[in-house]
Amino acid sequence: MSNQILSVAEVTDMIAAEGLGWEAGTTSLSNLSAEEQRRRLGVLASDAELAAMEQATQARAQAEIEAFKLAAPVGAPAAWDWRSAAGQNYVTPVKDQGNCGSCVAFGTCATVEANIRIKAKKPSMAVDLSEAFLLFCGGGSCNGWGLTAGLDYAKATGVTDEACFPYQDHNMPCGNRCSDWASRLKKILSYAGRATMDARKAALSTIGPCVAGMAVYNDFFNYKSGIYVKASAASLAGYHCICVVGYDDNQQCWIVKNSWGTGWGDGGFVKIRYNQADLLIDTSWQFYSVDPDVQPEKGCADASHILVDKNFGGSIVLWAYVNAAWRHKVVTDVELAGIAQEVFAANRVTVCYDNDLITLIRAWKQF
């Protein structure tokens, strides 16, 4: 790994000497020390683990090639970007991981957030997952984490919202999470690796953004715009987790959401040229698409909790926790009295809902 910091002028000269075509400039990371720059990364991978992941990626690619031979040919579009899919932006705002090797949590949460919006068909849906919960409750730390560790935890346990466990860029105890964290979890049902270009583009254009890993070189910290191609003289700084939100075959690049704030890159995003072996993104690591557990907008299910907010002199709101979300309805005193009598006498309460609004309550009593 390199301890060398490259100035904007040095990177600009390197770009010009090789005709790479992208723009370097002063970013929010340019004036950090080499150690501080490395702490903006955070994928932990030994040489043996890198070799094993590359072997697994190659095996996956071969299986995908065979599967594509048997399937009816369906080409992915020449370009796709979830920031402007049919005129809608499904990608949540860029965040800043700060001085903590928490990129795995940020890349994972960014991917899950966008896929929740896509699966729910709500591009403006408010979803902000807690990177702190995922990292510090899932077994990671500011020293880094494995590339798919966040996906494993999001599947097994889930991730709370940011308000339950606000992120700070230092190691935090899991006990800092909110007291009702268990009722606020969002989970993924599964995730799947994609190794070939065809499989990646198909997943990106039909499912959603993907978690990916890359090797970061010291010219990357000064990236401002254009299609990034590593300068040959740049030195390895470490490994990083990112969220791939699209691609463009005309420009031969992946479109990537980073976690270094909007003061780096093109508003926090970067375009990375395909097939750069040194970056490992297309050789050693797979892209991982996710299937989030998004509950239907309408439905009926048994409630696990019922509560009432009664503002004296104001509104009365009946709440029910059903299908992993709180649903509500404003009721009158008379309605509340009748509902309460039936609910407290019941063995089971079924609630029907339309989005967050309760449409029916059925109280069951076993005799």
Image (cartoon, rainbow, N blue to C red):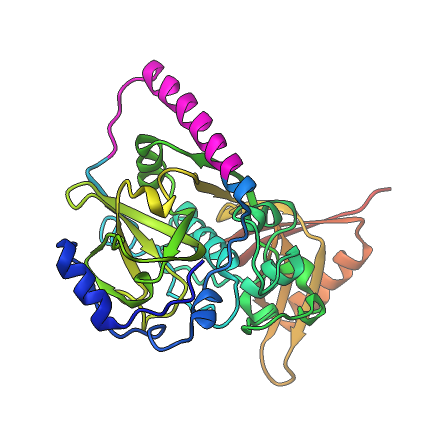
- Of the 4 image quadrants, the one containing the C terminus is top right
Q: Is residue 57 magenta?
A: yes
- 293 to the left or right of 224: right
Instruction: Tell me where the magenta segment starts and ends, as one range.
Output: 51-76
Q: Which residue lies at the image location 38% right of the left edge and 37% below the top edge?
A: 283
209 vs 254, nearest the viewer: 254
- 129 to the left or right of 342: left
Residue 160 on image: x %, y %: 59, 60
Q: Which residue lies at the image location 47% right of the left edge and 51% below the top edge?
A: 112
88 vs 211, nearest the viewer: 211
Quadrant of residue 265 within the rendered picture: bottom left
Query: Looking at the image, which residue sits at the far bottom?
Result: 313
Residue 114 on image: x %, y %: 41, 53
Residue 194 on image: x %, y %: 41, 34
Task: Give the vertical position of 28 relative to 1 (above or below).
Answer: below
Q: Which residue lies at the image location 43% right of the left edge and 29% below the top edge?
A: 58
Quadrant of residue 236 within the rendered picture: bottom left
- 236 to the left or right of 350: left
Residue 267 on image: x %, y %: 28, 67
- 318 to the left or right of 169: right
